[in-house]
């Protein structure tokens, strides 16, 4: 084809090889190979239904596209001079059936609407995979939580021991976050599931095409109407990277805690050997490398988001080749997020809490102080602020004398209350012991969402219902995608067979 299919009319010479290598998106386009073939099939079916090309022409084109669909990408010549997969597919069809008929394939479409549609088709599936992976992790967290309803552990604010909680409560906090991530992914899916086909370069076409038909053939929920917006927008991609980046941010917090808590300094959990590596010089080392990388991958996805936003910012409307640079950031974000969630799910499933150590540490650092203040309010009729100050004084005196929470007595209470409110408050030593007991402190907290066993059981039930609901929704969407793909091929086949 000499100067090439695309250039022979306008240019006398081929592009400089360095320049064509530089602008080619070929290697990033592998992800959209099948979508591009599907789009060409759907478009051809619509063209003949609308009487724009004859049934015979359509049958010839569809047979060539079908053979490409079956044969796979190895049938294509992917030399960078072709610029991208869109041209490679068109060139394949023309080589197979000649330009007189094959040359009609690109009637009433542009690479601009085609690339946006192809990204959306590929992204739909990736978002479903991502959603499923998150659901898996939520399920694993629920299973772990169920085994640890009564596992008391220290809870932290400012990374200082704050109040006792349960390991289940901690795990369910991440279930809540990841379920919101799943909702964000579902929102991104709905934004993505809209067809730009028929927008052509940006201003549509005077051919009487049926945009809604192409949308239906590709299983899109609707047509992305404004043709300039349809080719020029990538906010569906930004939203998807954003959802991935937020999910990774949530995952990185969990990862950080696994790193911290498996250290000798915390000793709260054991990371299984299968998810640890060792040092080439220090024979004793057991390093939580999976969690470290999950923490780092979050940075990468965040970087992708920043890059993608910067790329779209202030970009003049409609298609610019800048947009080509966004697509690899999108795939990388979703792929890294999927693999991070996949491996972290396995790690969490195998994670072992060190229950005795957790309880011991939960009792350190006067962690039941808040509960003692609450008990004083109930037992001695004090205001909360009075009780808060009295307990604070009891603790500061104890700290000065190197005493722990277990050493606190009613005499300390009497002394501190005298100093703070000018009168002596007392209570049964028994009640004070109970208030200071970490287990009692946690088990008595059963309001909505709290770490007590009763509250946890309610949370588990509610979370399982949510999990099922999302599972069903993603499954329904996946089935719709699979069916539309199968129907598309059948529609093509019955036109040439
Ligand atoms: N390779 C391009 C991309 O990935 C496809 C669209 C090219 N359009 C154009 N007018 N050069 O975005």
Image (tube, grey):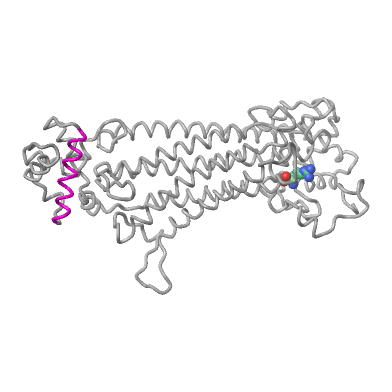
Compared with 395, 381 (above or below) is above
Q: For residue 400: magenta?
A: yes
Q: Which residues are magenta?
A: 384-401
In what quadrant of the picture does the C terminus appear?
top right
x then y, percent, for residue 455? 28, 33
x then y, percent, for residue 408? 11, 48
Q: Give left or right: position of 182 versus 95.
A: left
x then y, percent, for residue 229? 71, 32
- Ligand 1 rendered quadrant: top right
Is residue 462 visible in this depiction of the protein? yes
Residue in front for this viewpoint, 276 or 416:
416
x then y, percent, for residue 288? 40, 59
Residue in front for this viewpoint, 54 or 434:
434
Residue projecting furthest to the bottom? 281
Magenta region, mostly helix, strand or loop?
helix
Residue in front for this viewpoint, 415 or 203:
415
**Number of marks in picture:** 0
Identify which residue is drawn at 55% across, 41% down: 242
Q: Give left or right: position of 427 versus 89.
A: left
Is residue 67 visible in this depiction of the protein? no
Q: For residue 326: magenta?
A: no
Q: Give left or right: position of 408 versus 52.
A: left
Identify which residue is drawn at 33% across, 60% down: 263
Identify which residue is drawn at 35% across, 52% down: 351
Residue in front for this viewpoint, 129 or 163:
163
């Amino acid at each position: 084809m000499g100067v090439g299919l695309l250039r022979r009319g306008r240019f006398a010479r081929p592009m400089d090889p360095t320049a064509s290598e530089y602008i080619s998106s070929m290697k990033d386009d592998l992800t959209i190979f099948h979508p591009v073939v599907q789009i060409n099939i759907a478009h051809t079916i619509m063209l003949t239904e609308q009487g724009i090309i004859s049934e015979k022409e359509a049958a010839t084109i569809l047979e060539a596209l079908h053979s490409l669909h079956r044969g796979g990408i190895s049938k294509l010549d992917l030399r960078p001079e072709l610029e991208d997969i869109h041209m490679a597919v068109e060139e394949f069809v023309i080589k197979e059936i000649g330009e007189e008929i094959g040359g009609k394939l690109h009637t009433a479409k542009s690479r601009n609407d085609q690339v946006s549609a192809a990204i959306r088709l590929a992204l739909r599936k990736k978002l479903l995979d991502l959603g499923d992976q998150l659901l898996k992790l939520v399920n694993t967290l629920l299973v772990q939580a169920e085994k640890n309803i009564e596992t008391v552990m220290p809870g932290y604010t400012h990374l200082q021991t704050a109040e006792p909680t349960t390991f289940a409560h901690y795990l369910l906090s991440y279930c809540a976050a990841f379920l919101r991530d799943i909702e964000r992914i579902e929102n991104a899916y709905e934004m993505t599931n809209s067809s730009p086909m028929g927008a052509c370069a940006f201003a549509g076409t005077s051919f009487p095409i049926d945009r809604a038909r192409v949308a239906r053939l590709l299983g899109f929920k609707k047509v992305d109407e404004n043709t300039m917006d349809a080719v020029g927008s990538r906010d569906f991609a930004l939203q998807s990277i954003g959802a991935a980046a937020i999910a990774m941010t949530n995952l990185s917090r969990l990862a950080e805690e696994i790193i911290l808590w498996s250290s000798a300094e915390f000793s709260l959990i054991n990371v299984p050997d299968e998810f640890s590596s060792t040092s080439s010089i220090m024979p004793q080392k057991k390093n939580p490398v999976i969690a470290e990388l999950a923490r780092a991958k979050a940075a990468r996805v965040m970087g992708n988001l920043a890059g993608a936003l910067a790329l779209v910012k202030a970009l003049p409307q409609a298609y610019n080749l800048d947009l080509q640079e966004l697509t690899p950031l999108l795939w990388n974000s979703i792929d890294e997020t999927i693999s991070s969630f996949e491996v972290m799910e396995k790690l969490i499933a195998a994670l072992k809490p060190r229950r005795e150590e957790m309880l011991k540490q939960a009792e350190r650092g006067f962690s039941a102080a808040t509960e003692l203040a609450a008990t004083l309010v109930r037992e001695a009729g004090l205001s909360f602020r009075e009780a808060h100050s009295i307990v604070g004084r009891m603790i500061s005196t104890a700290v000065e004398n190197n005493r722990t929470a277990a050493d606190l007595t009613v005499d300390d209470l009497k002394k501190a209350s005298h100093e703070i409110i000018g009168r002596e408050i007392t209570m049964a030593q028994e009640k004070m012991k109970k208030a200071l007991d970490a287990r009692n402190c946690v088990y008595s907290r059963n309001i909505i969402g709290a770490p007590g066993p009763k509250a946890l059981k309610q949370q588990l039930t509610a979370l399982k219902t949510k999990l099922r609901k999302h599972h069903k929704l993603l499954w329904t969407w996946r089935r719709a995608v699979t069916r539309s793909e199968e129907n598309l091929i059948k529609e093509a086949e019955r036109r040439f067979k």
